[in-house]
Structures are given as C-alpha cells and as structure tokens.
Amino acid sequence: APLNSRINDPFQLSRPDVHDISATIGKDLLGTDHPVLNSAARYFFSSEDGKGKGKQIRPVMVMLLSRALIFHNNEMEVSSSARLAHILKSQRRLAEITEMIHTASLFHDDVIDEADTRRGQPAAHHVFGNKMAILAGDYLLARASISLARLRNVDVVECMSTVIEHLVRGEVLQIKDSRTGVTDMEGYLRKNFYKTASLMANSCKSAALLRGNVTPAVVDAAYCYGKHIGVAFQLIDDALDFEGSAASLGKPALADLNAGLSTAPVLFAAESLGHQLIPAMARKFKEPGDVELALRCIHEADGVNRTKKLATIHAEKAMDAVMGALEPSPFRDSLVHLACRVVDRSS
Ligand code: FPP
Ligand code: MG
Ligand code: MG
C-alpha cells in the first residue's frame, strides 16, 4: 500500500485505545492534596483543548502491538474473551505508564535544557518554577512506579525500571558530551539508545510479556521493533534540527550546535572532513565562524541526508522485526506504517 494511504493508519487504528489515556492519567494525579501538583498534572494531562498532549507515539506503539498480539493464539491457550480483555487492560495501564515516564523525563529535561516551550505551550518550569517542575516529574515517576507494581509482573517491573536508569544515563552522557565537545558515532548512537530507544524497546517488550503465551522470538521482535523505531526517531529529530534552521533564515535555531552538541549530521561530516571540523567540535562551536564552518562541512558531506538514510535503515529493521515474527493483522501493518511515518515526518 502507498505510504500515505489512510488504510491502517496507526493513529486512527489506535484511537479507541489511546484517545483518553491523558484524561485517565490526569484523573489519577488529580487526587493529590497539593494544589501545585494538581495544576502540574492538569497542565499536561487534562487540558480541554488537547494542548500539552504531544504525539503520544509510545502509547500508540504499545496498543497497536498489544492488539497485534491478540492474533497470536496458540491451541494450548485457554484464551477466553474475558482473559483477553483482562490482558488488554493491563497493556493499557502499561501504555499510561510509558507516557507518564516520558512526561516526567520532559519536566526534568526542560529544566536542564532551560527550554522555553513544550508541546505548544510554555515549559512547565516557566509556569510552576524549577523546584515544582522537578517535584512534579518525581511525583509522576512515583505514580508510574505504583501503577507498574500493580501489574504484578516482575519481568515487566524490571524492564520499565531499566528504562528509568537508561534515561538518566543518556542524559548524563549528553551532559558529558556537551562539556567536552567530543563524541564519535558509536558514542552518539549509544546515547540515543539510552535517551530515546530504550523506553520504546522496553515498553514494546513489556507489552509482549503481559500478553504471555508467546515465544521468546516474539518478545525479541517486540523489543527490536521499539529499539529501531526509537533510534530512527532520534536520528530524524537530530536531522530536523538542521533543516528547520536552514529553512527559517535569520533565526538562530540549530539548538544542538548551539548547545555544543555534535549530532549525526556533524559526525557524518567529521568522517571525511574531520581535520577541519574536529577542532570546532572540541571547542563546542563557540568561536566566531564555527557554526558556519560546521554547516559548510555538513553540506559538503551531505550529512543531513546521510542521517535520514541511516534513520531509514533503522525503520526498515523495525518493519522486518514485526513482519518476521507477528501474525498477519491490520495492527501489524499499522506498526509497519508507523515506522514509515517516523522517518517521513517534518515536525
Ligand atoms: C529529551 O531530549 C529528553 C529525554 C529523551 C530524556 C531526558 C531524561 C532525563 C532528564 C533524566 C531524568 C529522567 C526521568 C525519568 C525523571 P532532548 O532534550 O534532546 O529533546 P527535546 O528537543 O524534546 O527537548
Ligand atoms: Mg530538551
Ligand atoms: Mg535534553
């Protein structure tokens, strides 16, 4: 099917499962007796106009995969429809947990990055102050942990706890890079795994674990799908940081370069033009002309397109993983479709 077709559109197909996830999280959090935590919860999870919700790509992935796994019915299994409904309910909890962990990390990230906006509104720390933004992130993480424990599945608890460790590790690696200005492609991809891909990989794996009665190959395929989608997602993010700025003349966007970070387009350029680029990378593009030099080198080495090509390779690996291991279903096809959307997006 053509990539832009509406058939098996991942966002349409997951809408019944995902559309009120924000409202559910919001309701859960609004039970607190602290007014600031209440407003912080409302800020991201229960605004009337749908602002602050984000793309919800993680819940979409978890629910599409969960639906696809219903088609894995072996004869040994007593899979009454009541049992399947019970499993789906736990997978929906998992989808909420992924969104809570993700949002908690964004509360903290925007403090660290001193970001002004998030999801089309002022960043939380601008509204509530740094202290409350940090505590709101911690609170969200705590609520996610309680919800996780209630799934009564220690393997899933281990997976999702590992994600939290990885998020922190990725952030620390990034701060280290931005201090020294030095990275190589391998270190960059490792950091991307910790920052972005681990949450997607482990939440997909957890969805398969909650399904139960599936082969280890299916669990691995779920992990593999999430991991490669995550790596592709972050590569495209890093490519868009350059394209947005090239298009919008006069705006000093280029957030990564300005933060002293060398992402994939720079690293590709450094492979052939390192003699020019590496000194500028090491001083984090701080001297006059450094940013222009980097842009020239990226242009000459076709760094942005090579980044997109690498993202496409990862998206294809994600598709292969589900095509190779999942039973045919519209949900499986929409997971393939989602992998295309991740590399085709422009925002
Ligand atoms: C966004 O990246 C940030 C992350 C993917 C993870 C941030 C993780 C932490 C702050 C560690 C703490 C974690 C928890 C769970 C509380 P970005 O800044 O590159 O992208 P952006 O443009 O969306 O801000
Ligand atoms: Mg940030
Ligand atoms: Mg950041």
Image (spheres, grey):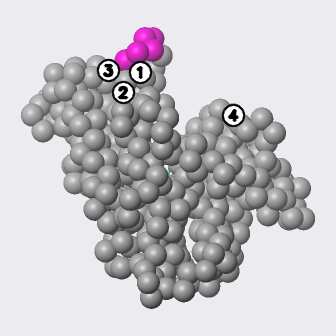
Label 2, label 4: how far apart the Cα atoms are: 22 Å
Q: Residue at x 42, y 38 (%)?
A: 341
Is the C-beta separation of discs 2 and 4 under 8 Å?
no
Say if residue 173 shows up in the picture.
no
Q: Is residue 248 magenta?
A: yes
The residue to which callout 1 is attached is: 245
Residue 296 image point, x, y percent: 22, 20
* Residues drawn in magenta: 246-250
Q: Residue at x 27, y 23 (%)?
A: 295
The residue to which callout 3 is attached is: 288
Which label was assigned to residue 121?
A: 4
> Mark 3, residues whose alpha carbon is within 10 Å: few (<14), some, or many (≥20)?
few
Q: Residue at x 81, y 39 (%)?
A: 48
Mark 2: amino acid: Phe
Q: Is mark 3 within 8 Å of ligand 1?
A: no
Label 2, label 3: how far apart the Cα atoms are: 19 Å
Residue furthest to the front in view is 75
In this rendering, is residue 30 above or below 146?
above
Q: Secondary structure at mark 2?
A: helix
> Between disc 1 and disc 4, whose residue precedes?
4
Q: Secondary structure at mark 1?
A: helix
Q: Is mark 4 within 8 Å of ligand 1?
A: no
> Between disc 4 and disc 3, whose residue precedes?
4
The residue to which callout 2 is attached is: 242
- Judged by depth in the image, the label closer to the viewer, 3 or 1, is 1
In this rendering, is residue 286 above or below 249?
below
> Mark 1, residues whose alpha carbon is within 10 Å: few (<14), some, or many (≥20)?
some
Is the C-beta separation of discs 1 and 2 under 8 Å?
yes
Mark 3: amino acid: Pro
Q: Nearer the viewer, residue 206 or 267?
A: 206
Q: Nearer the viewer, residue 323 or 229?
A: 323
